[in-house]
Amino acid sequence: MSTKIKYGTKEMDKDFGPLTFGSLLKNYRDNEEFSQKDFAQKLKISPQRLNDFEKGRRLPDIESAVKFAKILQDSEAFFIQILFQDYLSSKKLKLDVKVTKKIAA
């Protein structure tokens, strides 16, 4: 019998609210115990821009989201999915986004 408890994005949404691009960056920063200044430097952006992203005042463009995923060694598809979901949410559209990596033909 497995004692593992499934804790995915649906469970996280229930406990903490929906994942946003800003909260994604903030969670990375907090987990690595970076200051905003140091994390912004790692992402090659200004601390003010990072603060705007974390607070949800701005969203990055697609190229920046991909760049952040590469710098943080995470899934580009995941970062784009969260970014697109934020774009839809900002327009009050009740749609879900799923981004998957294209398999080469």
Image (cartoon, rainbow, N blue to C red):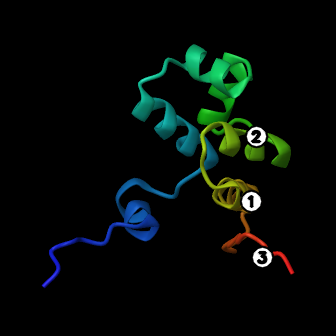
Residue pointed to by mark 2: 67
Q: Which numbered disc, 2 or 1, marks the residue that appears first in the sequence?
A: 2
Picture coordinates of residue 5 (x, y %)?
Answer: 24, 71
Q: Residues within 10 Å of mark 2 (few under 14, many from 20)?
A: some
Front one among 7 and 89: 7
Residue under pointer 3: 103
Point out the tag, 3 or 2, that comes first from the N-terminus: 2
Instruction: Single out the residue that lies furthest toward the top.
Output: 37
Placement of 31 over or under 84, stated as above or below: above
Q: Quadrant of residue 3?
A: bottom left
Q: Which mark is residue 84?
A: 1
Position of 81 relative to 27 (above/below): below
User: In this orientation, which residue lies closer to the viewer: 69 or 29?
Assistant: 69
Q: Are marks 3 and 2 in contact (CB under 8 Å)?
A: no
Q: Position of residue 70 (x, y in %)?
A: 69, 43
Residue 1 falls in which quadrant of the image?
Answer: bottom left
Residue 47: x, y in percent?
66, 17
